[in-house]
Image: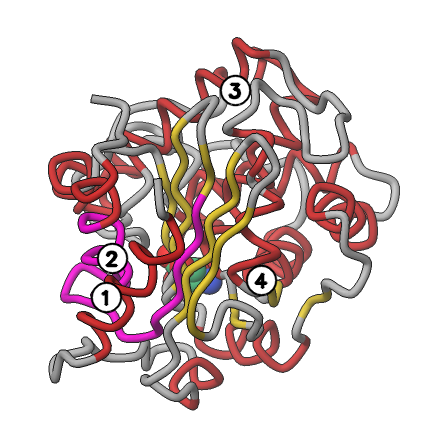
Amino acid sequence: MDYQTILEDIHHNLTARKDKGKVALYIPELAKVNIDNFGIYLNLINGENYAVGDYNKLFSIQSTSKIFALAKAFSIAGNDLWKRLDVEPSGNPFNHLSLLEQENGIPRNPLINSGAIVISDLLLSNLKNPKKDFLNYIRDLANDDSINYNEEVAKSEKKTGFRNYAAANLLKSFSNLENNVEDVLDFYFYQCSLEMSCAQLAKAVHFFGNHGVCSQGKKHLSSSQIKRINAIMLTCGFYDEAGEFAFEVGLPGKSGVGGGIIALLPNDFTIATWSPGLNAKGNSLLGMHALEQFTTKTKRSIF
Ligand code: GLU
């Protein structure tokens, strides 16, 4: 299959579009990003790579960090994790609150903000140096020590993260947070502020497509744990548009409000796209189209 030509065709077709969506405005640092950035990186499980556009530029991975935090927490807590979190799609935006109140402080899933805040709490309780250890975990997965947090983005979010404070306080009131609200959110905002390129992201998620084994051959999670995380990505990875992503693209994946998306086909490939313009549901507009075109042209999806 001529992957390079397929990626170039998709990039060319979509770059010509006038409507590129809107960059996220609620985090001031993200509002400054140029909407014309657009990159795609394909990492085949056999080690081949193909890329087009701005695939080496760094961007804020935002909620895409939730899959790494989940993987780390699952490797630490095993199935005890599911005592504090459910695995059902929320059908609601990432920062929705009322379900949390109705369901007694048990977040619907680990990929919405309230779920990721519980995961952050668990990591805070179990990692020696949470920020440093989490960063090293990502660097190890991507085999790249240049990856870092962006402190400006983390601070920017702290100032405007009112709904995250509300979620964390609700979780605390239901005794589903062990640590202080302030400490848990500080760690959560740092995770969201990680900056990576499409190339780094596609490599870092390699282990989700390879039964828990990263591109350097190290086993991070069991096949069964990877199966479960991929299932959560498929059903919960795209806010209240997870059904649409499964319908159009047919792959497990995760998006972030920085405009990045990762997706994967187990045993076959991982792929990362970045275009900062978002659709009305908060997913990258061109990224969604690019992945739909990719699975349609290559006829490769889990279905
Ligand atoms: N840091 C963002 C927030 O907590 C993440 C949102 C996202 O990417 O879904 O609001």
Which mark is first along the chain, 1 or 4? 4
Instruction: Answer left or right for 58 relative to 179.
Output: left
Q: Quadrant of the C terminus?
A: top left
Q: Which of marks 2 and 3 is nearer the N terminus?
A: 3
Q: Is residue 288 magenta?
A: yes
Element type at mark 3: helix
The crowding category of the residue bearing disc 1, from other C-alpha atoms within 10 Å (few below 14, some 14 to 19, many at least 20), is: many
Q: Give residue 187's quadrant in the image.
A: bottom right
In percent of width and height, residue 96 lies at 26, 50
Residue position marked by numbered label 4 in the rendering: 189
Marks 1 and 3, the one that precedes in the sequence: 3
Q: Which amino acid does label 3 sit on?
A: Ile
| Mark whose residue sits in front, 4 or 3 | 3
Identify the residue under disc 2.
Answer: 290
Q: What residue type is labelled 4?
A: Phe
Q: What separation in Å lies between label 2 and label 3 (alpha carbons)?
A: 25 Å
The x and y percentages for residue 133 are 81, 46
Residue at the disc numbered 1: 286
Marks 4 and 3 sit apart, C-alpha to C-alpha, by: 25 Å
Left or right of 157 in this view: 222: right
Q: Residue 177: percent from the left, percent from the top?
A: 58, 37
Residue positioned 70% across, 41% down in the render: 141
Per the image, is 190 magenta?
A: no
When the figure is inspected, residue 12 is found, relative to residue 9, above or below; the finding is below
Q: Describe the element under mark 2 as helix, strand or loop.
A: helix
Q: Name the residue under label 3.
A: 226
Q: Find out whether the residues at labels 1 and 2 contact each other: C-beta distance under 8 Å.
A: yes
Q: What's the residue at 23%, 77% (across, down)?
A: 15
The answer to whether residue 189 is above or below residue 38 is above
Mark 1 or 3, closer to the camera? 1
Bounds of the magenta segment = 271-293
- Estimate how packed mark 4 is, as few (under 14), some (14 to 19) or many (20 or more) residues with alpha carbons within 10 Å: many
